[in-house]
Image: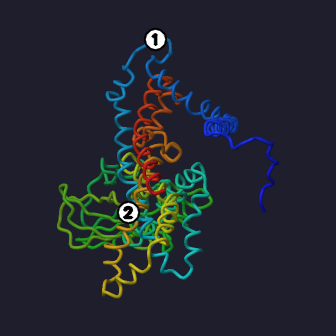
Amino acid sequence: MTAPTLPKEKGAGPPSPAARAEQVRRARRRGRVVALLFVFPALLLLGALVVYPVLFSVGRSFFDASGTRFVGGDNYTEIFHDPATLKAIRNTTIWVVVAPALLTGLGLILAVLVEKVRWATAFKLLLFMPMAVSFLAAGIIFRLAYDEDPDKGVLNAAVVSVHDAFKESPAYPSARAREGFGLTEGRDGSYLTNTSLSPGSTVTLPMVGVLPKDLPGGASPARPVEDGKTAADELRGVVYLDFAPGGGGTQGKIDPGESGMPGMKVEAVRDGHTVASTTTGSDGSFSFTGLKAGSYEVKLEQANFAQPYQGVSWLGPTLVTPMIIGAYLWIWTGFAMVLIGAGLSALPRDALEAARIDGANEWQIFRRITVPLLAPVLTVVFVTLVINVMKVFDLVYIIAPGPVQQDATVLATQMWLVSFGGGNNQGLGSALGVLLLLLVIPAMVFNVRRFRRSQ
Protein backbone atom coordinates (compact mmCIF):
# COMPACT_ATOMS: atom_id res chain seq x y z
CA MET A 1 0.00 0.00 0.00
CA THR A 2 1.50 3.31 -1.07
CA ALA A 3 1.05 6.64 0.68
CA PRO A 4 -1.23 9.12 -1.11
CA THR A 5 0.45 12.00 -2.90
CA LEU A 6 -0.78 15.55 -2.79
CA PRO A 7 -1.43 17.25 -6.09
CA LYS A 8 1.35 19.54 -7.14
CA GLU A 9 0.64 23.20 -7.62
CA LYS A 10 0.95 24.45 -11.13
CA GLY A 11 4.35 25.87 -11.81
CA ALA A 12 5.84 24.39 -8.56
CA GLY A 13 9.09 22.50 -9.15
CA PRO A 14 11.03 20.07 -6.91
CA PRO A 15 12.50 21.65 -3.69
CA SER A 16 16.04 22.84 -3.89
CA PRO A 17 18.86 20.97 -2.11
CA ALA A 18 19.11 23.76 0.46
CA ALA A 19 15.39 23.46 1.26
CA ARG A 20 15.67 19.71 1.60
CA ALA A 21 18.62 20.07 3.99
CA GLU A 22 16.66 22.59 6.04
CA GLN A 23 13.69 20.21 6.26
CA VAL A 24 16.00 17.39 7.46
CA ARG A 25 17.57 19.65 10.09
CA ARG A 26 14.12 20.70 11.36
CA ALA A 27 12.98 17.07 11.56
CA ARG A 28 16.11 16.12 13.50
CA ARG A 29 15.65 19.04 15.92
CA ARG A 30 12.03 18.05 16.50
CA GLY A 31 13.19 14.44 17.11
CA ARG A 32 15.83 15.57 19.60
CA VAL A 33 13.31 17.73 21.48
CA VAL A 34 10.78 14.90 21.64
CA ALA A 35 13.46 12.42 22.79
CA LEU A 36 14.70 14.87 25.43
CA LEU A 37 11.15 15.32 26.74
CA PHE A 38 10.81 11.55 27.17
CA VAL A 39 14.27 11.14 28.70
CA PHE A 40 14.05 14.18 31.00
CA PRO A 41 12.20 12.42 33.89
CA ALA A 42 14.78 9.61 33.88
CA LEU A 43 17.63 12.12 33.76
CA LEU A 44 16.05 14.05 36.62
CA LEU A 45 15.86 10.90 38.75
CA LEU A 46 19.38 9.87 37.77
CA GLY A 47 20.71 13.25 38.76
CA ALA A 48 18.82 13.31 42.06
CA LEU A 49 19.60 9.73 43.09
CA VAL A 50 23.09 9.18 41.62
CA VAL A 51 24.90 12.28 40.38
CA TYR A 52 24.03 14.60 43.26
CA PRO A 53 24.90 12.07 46.03
CA VAL A 54 28.22 11.30 44.32
CA LEU A 55 29.15 14.98 43.99
CA PHE A 56 27.97 15.70 47.55
CA SER A 57 30.05 12.78 48.92
CA VAL A 58 33.13 13.97 47.06
CA GLY A 59 32.72 17.45 48.52
CA ARG A 60 31.89 16.15 52.01
CA SER A 61 35.06 14.03 52.03
CA PHE A 62 37.14 17.23 52.26
CA PHE A 63 35.53 18.34 55.54
CA ASP A 64 35.86 17.17 59.14
CA ALA A 65 33.38 15.06 61.12
CA SER A 66 31.16 18.05 61.89
CA GLY A 67 31.14 19.17 58.25
CA THR A 68 32.08 22.76 59.12
CA ARG A 69 35.87 22.79 58.80
CA PHE A 70 37.72 22.16 55.54
CA VAL A 71 40.49 19.60 56.09
CA GLY A 72 41.62 18.96 52.52
CA GLY A 73 43.00 15.47 52.00
CA ASP A 74 43.29 14.59 55.70
CA ASN A 75 40.42 12.09 55.48
CA TYR A 76 42.10 10.29 52.59
CA THR A 77 45.36 10.23 54.54
CA GLU A 78 43.60 8.78 57.58
CA ILE A 79 42.23 5.91 55.46
CA PHE A 80 45.75 4.52 55.11
CA HIS A 81 46.71 5.12 58.75
CA ASP A 82 43.61 3.81 60.57
CA PRO A 83 44.12 0.09 61.53
CA ALA A 84 40.40 -0.72 61.16
CA THR A 85 40.28 0.78 57.67
CA LEU A 86 43.46 -1.01 56.64
CA LYS A 87 41.89 -4.28 57.82
CA ALA A 88 38.80 -3.46 55.74
CA ILE A 89 41.01 -2.91 52.67
CA ARG A 90 42.80 -6.21 53.35
CA ASN A 91 39.52 -8.11 53.69
CA THR A 92 38.12 -6.48 50.55
CA THR A 93 41.25 -7.60 48.68
CA ILE A 94 40.69 -11.16 49.91
CA TRP A 95 37.10 -11.01 48.71
CA VAL A 96 38.09 -9.66 45.27
CA VAL A 97 40.83 -12.26 44.79
CA VAL A 98 38.98 -15.31 46.12
CA ALA A 99 35.21 -14.99 45.61
CA PRO A 100 34.99 -14.09 41.86
CA ALA A 101 37.62 -16.69 40.92
CA LEU A 102 35.86 -19.45 42.88
CA LEU A 103 32.44 -18.47 41.54
CA THR A 104 33.61 -18.34 37.93
CA GLY A 105 35.34 -21.71 38.30
CA LEU A 106 32.35 -23.35 39.98
CA GLY A 107 29.97 -21.83 37.46
CA LEU A 108 32.07 -23.15 34.57
CA ILE A 109 32.35 -26.66 36.01
CA LEU A 110 28.65 -26.87 36.85
CA ALA A 111 27.60 -25.45 33.47
CA VAL A 112 29.65 -28.13 31.67
CA LEU A 113 28.42 -30.93 33.90
CA VAL A 114 24.76 -29.87 33.75
CA GLU A 115 24.81 -30.38 30.00
CA LYS A 116 25.36 -34.08 30.64
CA VAL A 117 22.61 -34.40 33.29
CA ARG A 118 19.22 -35.73 32.29
CA TRP A 119 17.25 -33.33 34.46
CA ALA A 120 19.38 -30.30 33.53
CA THR A 121 16.56 -27.74 33.84
CA ALA A 122 15.58 -28.89 37.33
CA PHE A 123 19.22 -28.91 38.41
CA LYS A 124 19.73 -25.36 37.13
CA LEU A 125 16.58 -24.23 38.89
CA LEU A 126 17.76 -25.80 42.15
CA LEU A 127 21.14 -24.04 41.97
CA PHE A 128 19.60 -20.73 40.93
CA MET A 129 17.00 -20.69 43.73
CA PRO A 130 19.30 -19.02 46.32
CA MET A 131 19.32 -15.95 44.08
CA ALA A 132 15.66 -15.50 45.03
CA VAL A 133 16.61 -15.29 48.72
CA SER A 134 17.41 -11.81 50.00
CA PHE A 135 20.84 -11.18 51.47
CA LEU A 136 19.18 -10.44 54.81
CA ALA A 137 17.44 -13.83 54.90
CA ALA A 138 20.57 -15.63 53.64
CA GLY A 139 22.65 -13.92 56.33
CA ILE A 140 20.26 -15.06 59.06
CA ILE A 141 20.25 -18.62 57.67
CA PHE A 142 24.04 -18.87 57.68
CA ARG A 143 24.36 -17.10 61.03
CA LEU A 144 22.30 -19.94 62.51
CA ALA A 145 24.11 -22.61 60.50
CA TYR A 146 27.49 -21.35 61.75
CA ASP A 147 26.36 -21.09 65.40
CA GLU A 148 28.96 -22.53 67.77
CA ASP A 149 26.31 -24.30 69.88
CA PRO A 150 25.86 -27.80 68.37
CA ASP A 151 22.20 -27.69 69.42
CA LYS A 152 21.66 -24.70 67.10
CA GLY A 153 24.36 -24.72 64.43
CA VAL A 154 23.93 -27.52 61.91
CA LEU A 155 27.59 -27.36 60.88
CA ASN A 156 28.87 -27.89 64.42
CA ALA A 157 26.24 -30.55 65.04
CA ALA A 158 27.71 -32.55 62.15
CA VAL A 159 31.30 -31.92 63.25
CA VAL A 160 30.57 -32.96 66.85
CA SER A 161 28.78 -36.11 65.68
CA VAL A 162 31.75 -37.16 63.57
CA HIS A 163 34.21 -36.31 66.36
CA ASP A 164 32.27 -38.27 68.98
CA ALA A 165 32.05 -41.25 66.65
CA PHE A 166 35.84 -41.61 66.67
CA LYS A 167 36.77 -40.20 70.09
CA GLU A 168 35.16 -40.85 73.43
CA SER A 169 33.54 -37.83 75.08
CA PRO A 170 34.35 -36.87 78.69
CA ALA A 171 32.25 -38.90 81.11
CA TYR A 172 31.26 -36.25 83.66
CA PRO A 173 31.91 -32.66 82.50
CA SER A 174 29.75 -31.12 85.23
CA ALA A 175 30.87 -33.35 88.16
CA ARG A 176 32.78 -32.00 91.14
CA ALA A 177 33.92 -33.45 94.44
CA ARG A 178 31.85 -33.09 97.58
CA GLU A 179 33.69 -30.46 99.61
CA GLY A 180 35.18 -31.55 102.91
CA PHE A 181 35.20 -35.25 102.18
CA GLY A 182 38.76 -36.13 101.22
CA LEU A 183 39.28 -34.65 97.74
CA THR A 184 41.16 -31.51 96.72
CA GLU A 185 40.97 -29.98 93.23
CA GLY A 186 44.27 -29.58 91.42
CA ARG A 187 45.31 -26.76 89.09
CA ASP A 188 44.64 -28.87 86.02
CA GLY A 189 41.08 -29.69 87.09
CA SER A 190 41.80 -33.16 88.46
CA TYR A 191 41.00 -34.27 92.02
CA LEU A 192 43.48 -35.79 94.50
CA THR A 193 42.90 -37.32 97.91
CA ASN A 194 44.22 -35.03 100.62
CA THR A 195 45.31 -37.90 102.86
CA SER A 196 47.91 -40.59 102.21
CA LEU A 197 46.69 -44.15 101.71
CA SER A 198 48.59 -47.40 102.07
CA PRO A 199 48.01 -50.80 100.43
CA GLY A 200 45.32 -52.74 102.26
CA SER A 201 43.18 -49.63 102.89
CA THR A 202 39.98 -48.38 101.26
CA VAL A 203 38.68 -44.96 100.19
CA THR A 204 35.24 -43.55 99.41
CA LEU A 205 35.06 -40.63 96.95
CA PRO A 206 31.70 -38.78 96.90
CA MET A 207 30.88 -36.62 93.85
CA VAL A 208 28.09 -34.14 93.12
CA GLY A 209 26.99 -31.92 90.21
CA VAL A 210 25.59 -34.71 88.01
CA LEU A 211 21.89 -35.32 87.46
CA PRO A 212 20.90 -38.97 87.92
CA LYS A 213 19.40 -38.98 84.41
CA ASP A 214 22.80 -37.98 82.97
CA LEU A 215 24.58 -41.04 84.39
CA PRO A 216 25.65 -43.71 81.88
CA GLY A 217 23.03 -46.33 81.09
CA GLY A 218 25.01 -49.14 82.75
CA ALA A 219 25.33 -47.39 86.13
CA SER A 220 24.30 -49.55 89.12
CA PRO A 221 23.83 -48.75 92.83
CA ALA A 222 27.05 -48.04 94.70
CA ARG A 223 28.16 -50.43 97.44
CA PRO A 224 30.40 -49.57 100.38
CA VAL A 225 33.82 -51.21 100.31
CA GLU A 226 33.85 -53.93 102.95
CA ASP A 227 36.70 -53.72 105.41
CA GLY A 228 38.84 -56.79 105.89
CA LYS A 229 38.44 -57.98 102.32
CA THR A 230 41.29 -55.91 100.86
CA ALA A 231 44.58 -57.69 100.20
CA ALA A 232 47.83 -56.38 101.67
CA ASP A 233 49.06 -55.16 98.27
CA GLU A 234 45.69 -53.82 97.17
CA LEU A 235 44.06 -50.38 97.35
CA ARG A 236 40.32 -50.35 96.85
CA GLY A 237 37.70 -47.63 96.65
CA VAL A 238 34.43 -46.44 95.15
CA VAL A 239 33.43 -43.27 93.28
CA TYR A 240 29.72 -42.55 93.62
CA LEU A 241 27.12 -39.82 93.15
CA ASP A 242 26.41 -38.50 96.64
CA PHE A 243 22.77 -37.76 95.95
CA ALA A 244 19.80 -39.77 97.16
CA PRO A 245 16.70 -39.56 94.92
CA GLY A 246 13.86 -37.99 96.86
CA GLY A 247 16.18 -36.21 99.29
CA GLY A 248 17.56 -37.24 102.62
CA GLY A 249 20.67 -39.30 103.20
CA THR A 250 23.98 -38.45 104.80
CA GLN A 251 26.66 -36.46 102.99
CA GLY A 252 29.88 -38.38 102.39
CA LYS A 253 28.22 -41.74 103.09
CA ILE A 254 26.84 -44.23 100.58
CA ASP A 255 23.08 -44.31 101.18
CA PRO A 256 20.59 -46.75 99.64
CA GLY A 257 19.64 -45.70 96.10
CA GLU A 258 22.82 -43.73 95.44
CA SER A 259 24.48 -44.72 92.19
CA GLY A 260 28.06 -45.51 91.36
CA MET A 261 29.84 -43.54 88.62
CA PRO A 262 31.12 -46.01 86.02
CA GLY A 263 33.85 -45.22 83.52
CA MET A 264 35.71 -42.83 85.84
CA LYS A 265 39.47 -42.89 85.20
CA VAL A 266 41.38 -43.33 88.48
CA GLU A 267 45.15 -43.30 89.14
CA ALA A 268 47.35 -44.37 92.05
CA VAL A 269 50.02 -41.70 92.60
CA ARG A 270 53.23 -42.06 94.61
CA ASP A 271 55.75 -39.25 95.04
CA GLY A 272 54.04 -37.30 92.25
CA HIS A 273 54.24 -40.15 89.73
CA THR A 274 51.41 -42.37 88.49
CA VAL A 275 52.17 -46.00 89.32
CA ALA A 276 48.84 -47.58 88.40
CA SER A 277 45.60 -46.64 86.66
CA THR A 278 42.21 -48.19 86.22
CA THR A 279 38.58 -47.41 85.40
CA THR A 280 35.62 -47.68 87.73
CA GLY A 281 33.08 -50.43 87.23
CA SER A 282 29.31 -50.09 86.85
CA ASP A 283 28.92 -49.58 90.62
CA GLY A 284 31.79 -47.06 90.76
CA SER A 285 34.24 -49.45 92.42
CA PHE A 286 37.94 -49.63 91.53
CA SER A 287 40.96 -51.59 92.71
CA PHE A 288 44.76 -51.28 92.39
CA THR A 289 46.66 -54.52 92.97
CA GLY A 290 50.35 -55.38 93.27
CA LEU A 291 51.25 -52.15 95.07
CA LYS A 292 54.42 -51.96 97.08
CA ALA A 293 54.41 -50.77 100.67
CA GLY A 294 54.34 -47.00 101.04
CA SER A 295 52.10 -43.95 100.90
CA TYR A 296 49.80 -43.39 97.93
CA GLU A 297 47.24 -40.87 96.77
CA VAL A 298 44.23 -41.55 94.57
CA LYS A 299 43.71 -39.20 91.66
CA LEU A 300 40.63 -38.66 89.50
CA GLU A 301 41.99 -37.57 86.10
CA GLN A 302 41.15 -34.22 84.61
CA ALA A 303 39.88 -36.03 81.49
CA ASN A 304 36.85 -37.17 83.50
CA PHE A 305 35.69 -33.57 83.95
CA ALA A 306 36.76 -31.93 80.67
CA GLN A 307 34.09 -30.13 78.71
CA PRO A 308 32.75 -32.10 75.73
CA TYR A 309 33.94 -31.19 72.25
CA GLN A 310 31.86 -28.25 71.05
CA GLY A 311 32.98 -28.12 67.45
CA VAL A 312 34.69 -25.34 65.51
CA SER A 313 34.36 -21.61 66.11
CA TRP A 314 33.24 -20.89 62.54
CA LEU A 315 32.59 -17.23 63.28
CA GLY A 316 35.78 -16.67 65.25
CA PRO A 317 38.37 -14.08 64.15
CA THR A 318 40.26 -16.62 62.01
CA LEU A 319 37.44 -18.22 60.02
CA VAL A 320 34.77 -15.53 59.87
CA THR A 321 35.78 -14.11 56.46
CA PRO A 322 36.05 -17.53 54.70
CA MET A 323 32.68 -18.53 56.18
CA ILE A 324 30.98 -15.37 54.89
CA ILE A 325 32.55 -15.96 51.47
CA GLY A 326 31.06 -19.48 51.62
CA ALA A 327 27.59 -17.98 52.14
CA TYR A 328 28.22 -15.63 49.21
CA LEU A 329 29.17 -18.60 47.01
CA TRP A 330 25.93 -20.36 47.93
CA ILE A 331 23.92 -17.38 46.69
CA TRP A 332 25.81 -16.50 43.50
CA THR A 333 26.96 -19.85 42.10
CA GLY A 334 23.67 -20.29 40.26
CA PHE A 335 24.04 -16.87 38.66
CA ALA A 336 27.50 -17.70 37.32
CA MET A 337 26.37 -21.14 36.14
CA VAL A 338 23.38 -19.78 34.20
CA LEU A 339 25.39 -17.06 32.42
CA ILE A 340 28.21 -19.42 31.52
CA GLY A 341 25.69 -22.07 30.51
CA ALA A 342 24.10 -19.58 28.09
CA GLY A 343 27.51 -18.96 26.53
CA LEU A 344 28.18 -22.68 26.42
CA SER A 345 24.96 -23.35 24.51
CA ALA A 346 26.06 -20.85 21.85
CA LEU A 347 29.37 -22.58 21.13
CA PRO A 348 29.78 -24.04 17.62
CA ARG A 349 29.06 -27.75 18.00
CA ASP A 350 30.95 -28.62 14.82
CA ALA A 351 34.25 -27.61 16.48
CA LEU A 352 33.54 -29.89 19.45
CA GLU A 353 32.48 -32.79 17.22
CA ALA A 354 35.54 -32.34 15.01
CA ALA A 355 37.78 -32.55 18.06
CA ARG A 356 36.07 -35.76 19.20
CA ILE A 357 36.45 -37.27 15.73
CA ASP A 358 40.17 -36.38 15.82
CA GLY A 359 40.50 -38.41 19.02
CA ALA A 360 40.52 -35.67 21.68
CA ASN A 361 39.19 -36.72 25.09
CA GLU A 362 36.72 -34.65 27.12
CA TRP A 363 39.43 -33.03 29.25
CA GLN A 364 41.37 -31.92 26.16
CA ILE A 365 38.18 -30.57 24.57
CA PHE A 366 37.35 -28.68 27.75
CA ARG A 367 40.83 -27.21 28.19
CA ARG A 368 41.73 -26.43 24.57
CA ILE A 369 38.37 -25.64 22.96
CA THR A 370 35.59 -24.94 25.46
CA VAL A 371 37.49 -22.62 27.80
CA PRO A 372 39.15 -20.52 25.04
CA LEU A 373 35.82 -20.09 23.23
CA LEU A 374 34.11 -19.15 26.51
CA ALA A 375 36.83 -16.65 27.46
CA PRO A 376 34.71 -13.54 26.66
CA VAL A 377 31.79 -14.85 28.73
CA LEU A 378 34.06 -15.89 31.60
CA THR A 379 35.66 -12.44 31.61
CA VAL A 380 32.30 -10.67 31.76
CA VAL A 381 31.12 -12.93 34.60
CA PHE A 382 34.38 -12.46 36.52
CA VAL A 383 34.40 -8.66 36.20
CA THR A 384 30.70 -8.44 37.09
CA LEU A 385 31.34 -10.46 40.24
CA VAL A 386 34.35 -8.28 41.10
CA ILE A 387 32.10 -5.21 40.99
CA ASN A 388 29.48 -6.97 43.12
CA VAL A 389 32.03 -8.22 45.64
CA MET A 390 33.49 -4.77 46.21
CA LYS A 391 30.06 -3.58 47.35
CA VAL A 392 29.21 -6.53 49.61
CA PHE A 393 27.66 -5.31 52.83
CA ASP A 394 24.60 -7.30 53.96
CA LEU A 395 26.23 -10.67 54.54
CA VAL A 396 29.21 -9.25 56.42
CA TYR A 397 27.06 -7.07 58.64
CA ILE A 398 24.54 -9.82 59.48
CA ILE A 399 26.70 -12.95 59.76
CA ALA A 400 29.70 -11.56 61.65
CA PRO A 401 28.93 -11.33 65.42
CA GLY A 402 29.62 -8.06 67.20
CA PRO A 403 32.94 -9.11 68.82
CA VAL A 404 34.44 -10.09 65.43
CA GLN A 405 32.74 -7.43 63.31
CA GLN A 406 36.06 -5.60 62.94
CA ASP A 407 37.82 -8.81 61.89
CA ALA A 408 35.34 -9.35 59.03
CA THR A 409 34.76 -5.74 58.00
CA VAL A 410 35.08 -4.70 54.35
CA LEU A 411 35.07 -1.25 52.78
CA ALA A 412 31.27 -1.05 52.52
CA THR A 413 30.66 -2.04 56.16
CA GLN A 414 33.52 0.14 57.37
CA MET A 415 32.03 3.10 55.49
CA TRP A 416 28.70 2.52 57.27
CA LEU A 417 30.29 1.96 60.70
CA VAL A 418 32.41 5.11 60.41
CA SER A 419 29.51 7.26 59.18
CA PHE A 420 26.45 5.95 61.04
CA GLY A 421 27.37 2.93 63.17
CA GLY A 422 28.88 4.81 66.07
CA GLY A 423 31.77 6.66 64.45
CA ASN A 424 29.67 9.70 63.40
CA ASN A 425 32.48 10.83 61.11
CA GLN A 426 30.80 11.37 57.78
CA GLY A 427 33.86 13.10 56.40
CA LEU A 428 35.92 9.92 56.69
CA GLY A 429 32.91 7.83 55.62
CA SER A 430 32.53 9.94 52.47
CA ALA A 431 36.23 9.46 51.72
CA LEU A 432 35.74 5.69 52.01
CA GLY A 433 32.76 5.92 49.67
CA VAL A 434 34.83 7.84 47.11
CA LEU A 435 37.62 5.25 47.42
CA LEU A 436 35.11 2.47 46.81
CA LEU A 437 33.77 4.32 43.76
CA LEU A 438 37.27 4.77 42.35
CA LEU A 439 37.93 1.03 42.78
CA VAL A 440 34.68 0.06 41.04
CA ILE A 441 34.93 2.44 38.07
CA PRO A 442 37.78 0.62 36.22
CA ALA A 443 35.88 -2.66 36.33
CA MET A 444 32.70 -0.95 35.11
CA VAL A 445 34.52 0.74 32.24
CA PHE A 446 36.11 -2.58 31.27
CA ASN A 447 32.72 -4.28 31.21
CA VAL A 448 31.08 -1.51 29.16
CA ARG A 449 33.86 -1.62 26.58
CA ARG A 450 33.55 -5.38 26.23
CA PHE A 451 29.80 -5.07 25.71
CA ARG A 452 30.32 -2.46 23.02
CA ARG A 453 32.95 -4.59 21.23
CA SER A 454 30.68 -7.63 21.35
CA GLN A 455 27.87 -5.63 19.72
Q: Mark 2 points at which residue?
A: 375
Separation (CA) of disc 2 from disc 1: 50 Å
Quadrant in which the N terminus is drawn: bottom right
x and y percentages locating residue 36 in the rendered image: 66, 35
Of residues 100 and 235, the one drawn nearer to the viewer in this rendering: 100
Counting labels gives 2
Name the side, left or right, on which 353 lies relative to 154. Answer: left
Residue, far top: 69
x and y percentages locating residue 11 in the rendered image: 77, 41
Q: Dot 1: few (<14), some (14–19), or many (≥20) neighbours within 10 Å?
A: few
Of residues 203 and 188, the one drawn nearer to the viewer in this rendering: 188
Of residues 401 and 114, the one drawn nearer to the viewer in this rendering: 114
User: Where, by quadrant of the figure, is residue 283 drawn?
Assistant: bottom left
The vertical placement of 414 against 184, above or below, is above
Q: Name the residue under label 1.
A: 69
x and y percentages locating residue 98 in the rendered image: 36, 54
Dot 2: element = helix
x and y percentages locating residue 121 in the rendered image: 58, 74
User: How did the renderer colour the structure?
Assistant: rainbow
Residue type, numbered disc 2? Ala
User: Where, by quadrant of the figure, is residue 414 drawn?
Assistant: top left
Residue type, numbered disc 1? Arg
Residue, far front: 11
Name the side, left or right, on which 257 lies relative to 81. Answer: right
Q: Residue at x 49, y 32 (%)?
A: 417
Q: Reading the chain from its start, which is encountered first: label 2 or label 1?
A: 1
Dot 1: element = loop
Q: Residue 327: which disc?
A: none
Instruction: Kindly tell me whether residue 178 is visible in this rendering.
Output: no
Q: Which residue is drawn at 46% across and 48% down?
A: 448
